[in-house]
Image (tube, helix red, strand yellow):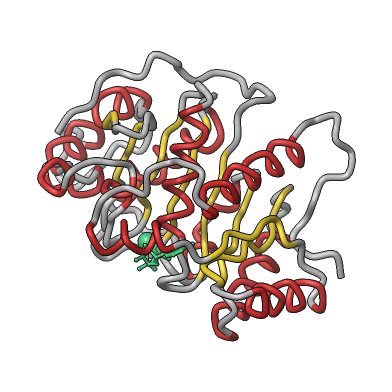
């Protein structure tokens, strides 16, 4: 499936640009949050590229594509013809390491009903730190281009856990959201993610509480963040409308529901934290 070309092409960053990585333990709501933030920013008229960086991708449904449309998207890393065109040389076994990648976005980013464009990265077989296989070279160059050189709002829906954070790409973002519910293991994972973000020098990083059904649960996340010197960037409550959307596979439609109000509030807080004139930038850990 091929998307329409994106009109807004990269260049120098402008104050409106934001590169956001959404991380956290499995099942905490990363895809919901990445998708709803992408939809929110797109609804304000910004060009948005949402990246599905999970090896089992499902951001497409959250952005409003049907299952059928989603199944037609070929992930970049699994597009053998593209990888060959970008990296092949006349010498068998010798790969080109320098190539253009902006055309990949124009050709393969899919326009979604949310207004955001979606790019699915896919799984790299035998990938790992320092992997030099052609598919990995293309994905690495593309991710770098998206995070460092583009003017769009770029939102990365990351794979669960922390392993991928060491691979470099996420470390170049300027906002990192560690999503967590009140579950202790989710909170500990979020704390590790925030520590790594802090070490990587990511300017705005912290926990976003999600799917807490009661004020007591939300308070657990708040208290954990405070005790560990971590900024709580926002809190998205449990919302039956989001749960229902998860069950039907339909997108959680922007509206006045509690979760959407909280997503809008979070987006506003991130923009404020990111503004160059705002000297009180928030960092992952304060301790
Ligand atoms: N605020 C919320 N209120 C109610 N349900 C929610 C909320 N956030 C997420 N959910 C539901 O929780 C489930 C898991 O969410 P999601 O798929 O976004 O998690 P994830 O962290 O991306 O999972 P994975 O690690 O598998 O990628 C989904 O069914 C989703 O609809
Ligand atoms: Mg997910």
Q: Nearer the viewer, residue 81 or 152?
A: 152
Outermost residue toward the bottom in this view = 184
Identify the residue shown where x is 73% and y is 78%. Answer: 224
Identify the residue shown where x is 31% and y is 56%. Answer: 245
* Image quadrant occupied by the N terminus: top left
Q: Quadrant for ligand 2?
A: bottom left
Give the vertical position of 267 relative to 161 (above or below). Answer: above
Identify the residue shown where x is 48% and y is 53%. Answer: 33
* Quadrant in the picture for residue 278: top right
Q: Nearer the viewer, residue 198 or 212?
A: 212
Residue 272 spot, x, y in % from top left:
75, 37
Residue 106 spot, x, y in % from top left:
30, 22
Outermost residue toward the top in this view = 7
Q: Nearer the viewer, residue 195 or 168?
A: 195
Identify the residue shown where x is 56% and y is 71%. Answer: 212
* Image quadrant occupied by the C terminus: bottom right
């Amino acid at each position: 499936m091929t998307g329409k070309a994106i009109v807004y092409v990269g260049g120098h960053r402008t104050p409106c640009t934001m590169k956001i990585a959404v991380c956290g333990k499995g099942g905490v709501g990363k895809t919901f949050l990445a998708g709803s933030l992408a939809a929110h920013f797109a609804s304000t008229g910004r060009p948005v590229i949402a990246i599905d960086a999970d090896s089992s991708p499902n951001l497409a449904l959250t952005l409003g594509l049907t299952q059928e449309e989603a199944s037609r998207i070929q992930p970049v890393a699994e597009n053998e013809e593209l990888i060959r065109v970008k990296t092949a040389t006349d010498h068998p076994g010798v790969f080109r390491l320098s190539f253009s990648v902006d055309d990949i976005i124009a050709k393969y980013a899919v326009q979604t009903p949310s207004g955001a464009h979606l790019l699915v990265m896919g799984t790299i077989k035998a990938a790992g730190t320092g992997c030099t296989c052609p598919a990995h070279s293309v994905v690495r160059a593309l991710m770098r281009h998206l995070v460092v050189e583009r003017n769009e709002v770029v939102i990365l829906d990351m794979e669960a856990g922390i392993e991928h954070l060491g691979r470099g790409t996420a470390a170049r973002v300027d906002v990192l959201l560690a999503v967590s519910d009140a579950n202790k293991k989710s909170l500990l994972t979020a704390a590790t993610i925030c520590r790594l973000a802090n070490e990587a020098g990511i300017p705005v990083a912290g926990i976003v509480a999600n799917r807490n059904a009661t004020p007591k649960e939300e308070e657990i996340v708040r208290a954990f963040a405070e005790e560990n010197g971590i900024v709580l960037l926002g809190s998205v409550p449990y919302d039956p409308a989001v749960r229902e959307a998860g069950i039907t596979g339909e997108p959680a439609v922007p509206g006045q529901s509690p979760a959407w109000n909280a997503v809008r509030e979070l987006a506003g807080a991130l923009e404020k934290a990111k503004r160059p004139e705002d000297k009180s930038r928030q960092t992952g850990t304060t301790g």
